[in-house]
Image: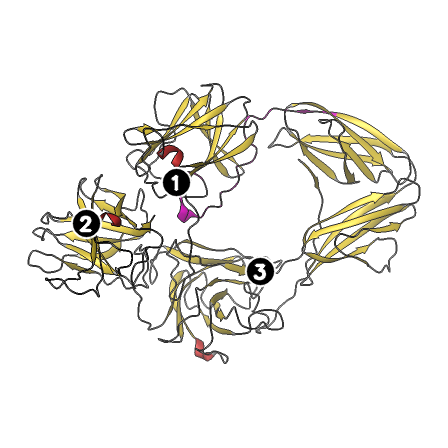
Amino acid sequence: MKYIKQLLVFFIVTTVFNACTEEETSYAFQNISAPSNIQATFNIAQDDTGNVSVSPTADGATIFEVYFGDTDSEVATEVAPGETISYTYTEGVYNLRIIAIGATGLTSELSREVVISFAAPTNLEIATVATTTNPLEVTVTPTATNATMFDVYFGDVDQEEPTSIMAGEEVSYTYAEAGSYTIRVVAKGAGAATLEGTKEFVASALLQPFAPASTPSNSAIDVISVFSDVYDNPDPIDYNPNWGQSTSYNQIVVEGDNIIQYGDLTYQGIDFNTAPINASEMEFIHVDIWTADDEFAAKISPISSGPNEAAYDLSLVANQWTSFDIPISFFTDANPAVDFSNIIQFKFDGVPSGEGTIFVDNLYFYKSASVMTMPTLPVDFESETLDYGIASFGGPNFEPIPAAIIDNPDASGVNTTSKVFEIEKVSGAQVWAGAGISLAGPADFSEGTTIEVDVWSPTAGTPILYKMEDSNSAPDANGNPSVIVEVEVSTTVANQWETLTFDLTTFAGFSTSNSYDKVILFPNFNNSGTGSTYYFDNFRISGATLQSPTIPVNFESSLLDYDVASFGGPNFEPIPAAIIDNPDASGINVSGKVFMIEKVSGAQVWAGAGISLAGPADFSGGTTVEVDVWSPTAGTPILYKMEDSNSAPDANGNPSVIVEVEVSTTVANQWETLTFDLTTFAGFSTSNSYDKVILFPNFNNSGAGNTYYFDNIKLIN
């Protein structure tokens, strides 16, 4: 890999905004940035003419202005992308400047010193340095009197084409393997004479990766991680169980990324202890492997209870990361088949055994990307199945500012939810910096026109601007949506949650007939960024009726009406059932809220509780239901039921259209995922309208005073 390390000088035109206007605050959801990666290819004729050719390039540039630097009153020469311009100098030293101009008028600049000398180059020196992270990489910095350019040959291939650099530049190169190489440099001036020199460089063998594997891009909702910094890993898990192996175990950190090292690999396990993984919904196993050892390979084996395992051959290439995406069908089609609903371990084997070392990263199960919908008001950021379409803007150089959905850093007061929307107004951010989300469609104002937002600010008296846009409205003069509504309210407390109220009718252009489908927040509006962080949550219309949930249901939202109903107490009264704080946030379920059902002593064998859905369940994504269950005993029968509340009543006055599936727990006092295949019920049909979910803990047994917890109800294929 060859590349030139160039010194780039960027000059960004910054406009200072002194007041709020529609044009100034309409930068939301735009990509405003100066041209980047500005470079130039130079060709200096070696014929004593002083002729120099320049070919500028840059990402996002529409035109270039070139200043050759030989007069104080020089007028720029314009060059279109892809064009080459020539200029003839007399002998001397000149500062050539190239200004790249983007479509928005923002600019970036590159400066180069051009030495024009017709005298032969002298005093050639070649500095070579191995990088600290990769002993196979060398950086070459040549210098010479009267030299304008250098051709560098790295000496590892026949008929090598040189890498050309300007005086004052350096070039880096990574060798494919360890060895001693002769680096040759040819110094050139503006005359025909050249000067050549060589330098020996020893590239050392790699012992570990000098860069991490590629960062996974799979959405977290489609992944079950085993080892990765990108996703949440299981707890408990043991990456070095004592199986009598001689393999050494270590973890290293490369550029902030944690990597497992298995040295002199014979065989090595990963054990999930008492918390098996249910990966039956997944489609692939992904793993990244690196080795420094030639002619060394490995095998990977997922192991299910039984135990049943099947090995997949990992063909490795020395000194580079190799990524594997292994179809789970490879293992389920094996004999005996691996049961992915109950994965208890992984195993790696070395081939040949004990004769090589591997480094492991990003080991996880995954499935094809889920189709994610966007949210509608109210919005609470708890869902993992929604695409919030986050966009931010207004950084110091017009780049995006940090904005993300994160764990609630202060779950207290008026907001104890698990997830919140974070916006960091970094130091030097524009006065109009902010971030927002996209909605699935126009907001419905039929039940009110006042917006409530829970806000956490580090200071009282901080102005918060709430804005909504119609993304499909005719653009204004700046190309931004012309239909907007903006309301500003200031915080009243510091370092705690409070609810701010934004009356949209106070904005002159607001109309309920407009289609507002974007929500944007501007923290500390009209003030430059100082590095403060703000949090937002629970966007809702004041006084609006709470909506019922839809599957998937995770019980985290305070903006939904779950309509909990229970039945079957000792005297046919309701039994205790409620949404509560997770009493055992561990293992596969660390969420904040869960659904509790207490089957009190003497409760009927059919006692249970349920919730109402916003409408019929959508089975287009699957007809198998997964529910996270916590039971005080293993072997407890759990009946999952759905009803069509509007179906004709049966003889007992209950809905006649139902589906029921019973599954028993397998562990005690910990969370596990139970799977209910609705197609096993004779009367089930996806054309029926099932709008209620009911759970019967310890079904067909009288109540004994035990409490059960349920969470994360979802449909899978």
421 or 481, nearer to the observer: 481
**Magenta stretch: dominant secondary structure:** loop
Q: Residue at x 73, y 29 (%)?
A: 154
SS of the residue at dot 3?
loop
Q: Is residue 647 magenta?
A: no
Q: CA distance from mark 3 to mark 1?
A: 35 Å
Decide if residue 214 is in sight here: yes
Which residue is label 2 attached to? 639
Q: Which residues are magenta?
A: 200-229
**Residue 490 occupies quadrant:** bottom left
Q: Residues within 10 Å of mark 1 (few under 14, many from 20)?
A: some
Image-quadrant location for residue 332: top left
Q: Residues within 10 Å of mark 2 (few under 14, many from 20)?
A: many
Q: Position of residue 399 (x, y in %)?
A: 59, 57
Q: Nearer the viewer, mark 2 or mark 3?
A: 2
Label pair 2/3, CB-CB below 8 angstroms: no
> Tag 1, which secondary structure?
loop
Instruction: Point out the tag, 2 or 3, that comes first from the N-terminus.
Output: 3
Quickly name the residue at label 1.
233
Q: Amino acid at mark 1?
A: Asn
Identified by mark 3, the residue type is: Ala
Say the numbered circle drawn on residue 429.
3
Confirm whether the magenta stretch covers residue 210: yes
- In the rendered image of this protein, does residue 192 appear above or below residue 593? above
